[in-house]
Amino acid sequence: MSTETPEVDTENRISLVEHLDGISKNSSAKDIRAAVRAAMADGWDLDAVKAQLHAQGLTEKLIGVALGKNKRKTGPAGDTSERFSQSAPGLSNGYAFSTDGAVEVLREQDDGTVVAYPVCSHMRALYHVSDMNGLGWATDVAVRDRRGHDHPVRISNGMLQTDPRAVVQKLSEAGLRTFVPPRVVAGAISDAAVPLARFSAASGWQMRGAVFALPGRIIGKMPDGEVLVADVGDRCRAGMEGTLEKWMSEVAAPCDGNPIPMVAVGTMLAGPAIEFLGGHAEVNTMIHIIGPSTGGKTTSLRAGGSVWGAGLPTSAPTSFLHPWRTTANASENLLAAHNHVGIAFDELKSFDRKAASSFAYDFANGRAKARMTADGMLRPEVVWELFALSSGERTLADLADEGQARHRQVQDAGVDVRVINIGAADIFRELHGAPDAKSFSEQLADASTRSYGHAGPAFVAWLAEHGDEARERLRLLHLAWGQVSAAKLPAGAAAQAGRVASRLGSIAICAALAADVVGVPWSAGAGDDALNASLSDGGAKAGPAARAMLWAFSEILAAWITEYGATSSTEESALLRDLIGFFHMSPGRFQSSTYGGAGVDKDHATSIPDRLGWAVRDGNEVLLNVDCLPSALRQKLGWSDTQVRRAIRAIAAKGLLVRSKHSELTFRRRGDGGMANVYRINAAFFESNP
């Protein structure tokens, strides 16, 4: 019998009406069944038949009762016990599959025979699942649609027990067709003998490092025979194509000798080792590559992304890379979905400016804000530990500084530690036979779309079997990196430079271990005597690939030092002296204000034209703070945004900056016509000698 719906032309439509002619709400079940069978034998789909019956005045209940009596005998009394005690795979006791895969319910008759009644089209339970804490129980079901495709559906236990109609509605939306009342359909899966499972909204290591969850794949073994389901949807688009060998030769090998592509690959390889870092861990760090649109930034990200998935442009739905514009909404779930895996963002210019001002802190925090369920209970905590890549033509801090059109908020120095900016000049030093950098970039980008998704899981599989060895090798690599980075930092380096070196080091040592274990074909930096000496002195086990990886990260650290400076320089001191002089030379341009608590200081007299800020005093006219308008520093002192950030951060480092929030450098106070963002600087600063 065909289940395909014929072309609905005039002739077929008349044919269906003729089949059902005379059927009404007063017809017997026998007559209805006969008419339906005749129509389906002629090629009509059951849904089309039911729709026509509805048009002729029959109710859903009447149709269901009539079709439900379309029973078939399945055996004599002798096999009744066996049929009822042994359920079909994925169904509750008392249900079975017909020869065409539809679900039937079994009923024992008075004469001892077992009769099967049609229930619905094909579905089966897969798991009875809970969250990682043993709560939130549900049943995962596979529903087969008309095209023969199976779709996963999760039905909560509460819905199964109390609202069968809602169960059927949810299953029907995935393609299920039902022929009996909803409670009978729900009963087919509610007590199915299927494995127990736990679901996690995060990828990565679960159950204390026993298993590693990826979308559609689990590496390792769950205790007690349970199953782990990574419930990350399409937020983490990990996948496989080609072979590991092809990826090695066509993606990894061309990166050798090019520090930025090497670091991109290494950053994406490093994530699974976070679980084994122990006390050395500084996680949730992002490497942001800055440069012109055609400089090779995106190609480097695509090569890095190929460690786990397709290195396609972000416009492709299967690309492992994510565009920044999608990050503002549900960023917490997106980060959790890449836990211990790593994430790559492209096209920073598309990111929302207001969201940029808080993303770096949310990213580094490693956990979502606590939220309540509808019944007042705390939702399960959403957490993440990962390393990230990003690219853009400007920094995240610069974008955040434009988050407000009228009063800009400058980001704290912590942003440049958590999000490490790397200039993209001269990305492709070694072209490996390509005629020019453009051709090389195109070849590398294309290779990232053909072979991908093998290196990351290969490293995970090794870690699952060699946890103790991994911890010891990471400990020794950490000691070696300390010597490598110390050699790069100039004398008198600022604390921020040390923090950047430390955060880069956490990524570098994990990436070095991964490169050795997976067998990445790299040898760059083999002649770096200082690097080799550091590894030898610490006794670290490091093959050519690990040495090359540490060399690449040390090159990146050196580039950061050159670009952003690592000491409290004479330029910084000059900026601070200019700010002090600016206040003392123009005291009348700062309106007097009496301190009255955050945001409610009382201004004296009328507003001063072309005001530069406020001088906040106590009741005895003693100067407490100076509130500088950001626009005044840029316009009157001629400072760039970078100079503003540098000066304000230096004041904050001295403990002389008053903030409204720890995550911001600005202070909110009342100004003309509303609230204003200012830099509230303690009066002691203006009496100091930087």
Image (tube, rainbow, N blue to C red):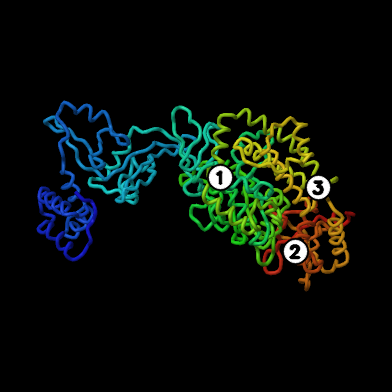
Q: Secondary structure at mark 1?
A: helix
Q: Could you tell whether 469 is left or right of 101 in the image?
A: right
Residue 369 appears anywhere in the view = no
Q: Counting residues from the N terminus, which is met first, the one under dot 2 or under dot 1?
A: 1
Q: Nearer the viewer, residue 542 or 256?
A: 256
The amino acid sitting under disc 2 is: Pro
Q: Earlier in the sequence, mark 1 or mark 3?
A: 1
Instruction: Say few, some or many: other residues with alpha carbon within 10 Å of mark 3 (under 14 / 14 to 19 / 20 or more).
Output: some
Amino acid beneath label 3: Ala
Q: Position of residue 682 (x, y in %)?
A: 81, 55
Residue 236's label in the rendered image is none
Q: Residue at x 76, y 60 (%)?
A: 642
Q: Is residue 487 above or below residue 348?
A: above
Query: On the image, which quarter does residue 394 sit in?
Result: bottom right
From this view, report whether residue 20 is shown above or below residue 149: below
Circles 2 and 1: CB atoms closer than 8 Å: no
Near mark 2 (Cα within 10 A), the count class, few <14, some 14-19 or many ≥20, is many
Q: Which residue is labeled 3 in the image?
A: 494
Element at label 3: loop
Mark 2 sits on what residue?
630
User: Could you say which is closer to the camera, residue 177 or residue 518?
Assistant: 518
**Image: 256 above or below 94:** below
Return the mark for residue 247. Answer: 1
